[in-house]
Image: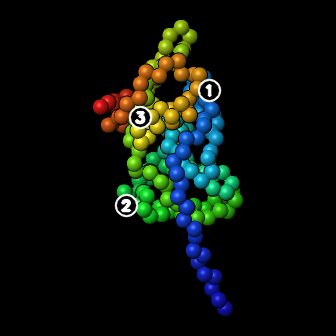
Amino acid sequence: MTSVAQAKSETIEFPCEEWIATRTPQGELIGINPVPGSWTMISGEDRRRFAERQMNVKAFFACPRCNQVGFIPEGFKPPVTLGDTRPLGELHCRKCGFYCNVILKDWDKRILYCACYETRQGDSLEPHKEYLHAENELEAKGFFWSQHGREVTNLVGIAPAIGFFMEKPGDDRILLV
Ligand SMILES: [Zn+2]
């Protein structure tokens, strides 16, 4: 009798890509267009909305084969040595059965940015803050506009944030540098 050898799985790098989102006029996420074999960081506002529904989501990734979307939770903090150099873990897709080791490229390289923008509520403008990760301001703007559309009346600005407090939703302490 021979035992079944553990198949050595393939290692695949998942780049960070912009996924185009569809939103309600209130900014609520109703659909997202995943890029197969990539990951994307979701905004702080979306994380709060997921948290309200008892869901812990920090980022999405998509199966390279069937594009099934998986969640990466808030607590997922791989050691810095993992990031770009060693496989993080195993992906086993429940939909198509695809199996590989994953490297989330640039997971640790991104800077937290804060975007301040306004939406129209009747006759007045309502201010919003949203947090997103990007390597630079240009990329932060690209991510922001991939996530938003005409519901944004005015993008006031995007700047690096050095504090991010998720513990008390609604408590908007943030330090801008
Ligand atoms: Zn799959």
Q: Position of residue 92 (x, y in %)?
A: 61, 62
- Say which residue label 3 marks: 137
Image quarter where the C terminus lies is top left
Inspect the image, locate mark 1, and give the three-letter code of the amino acid beneath it: Thr
Q: Coloring scheme of the render?
A: rainbow
Identity of the amino acid at label 2? Thr
Viewer-closest of 74 and 81: 81
Spatial CA span between label 1 and label 3: 25 Å
Q: Is mark 3 on a helix, strand or loop?
A: helix
**Where is residue 85 shown, x and y percent of the image?**
42, 62
- The tag on residue 24 is 1
Mark 2 near mark 1, Cβ–Cβ under 8 Å? no
- Mark 3 and mark 2 residues within 8 Å of each other at the beta carbon: no
Note whether residue 56 is visible. no
Q: Distance between the residues labelled 3 and 2?
A: 25 Å
> Disc 1 vs disc 3: Cβ atoms closer than 8 Å?
no
Q: Which amino acid does label 3 sit on?
A: Glu
Instruction: Please tell me which residue lies in front, 47 or 144.
Output: 144
Residue 26: x and y in percent read 57, 23
**Dividing the picture into quarters, in which one does residue 136 lie?**
top left
Q: Earlier in the sequence, mark 2 or mark 1?
A: 1
Among all residues in the image, which is located at the extreme top?
123
- Which mark, residue 81? 2
Q: Nearer the viewer, mark 2 or mark 1?
A: 2
In the displayed structure, 77 sits above or below 92; it is: above
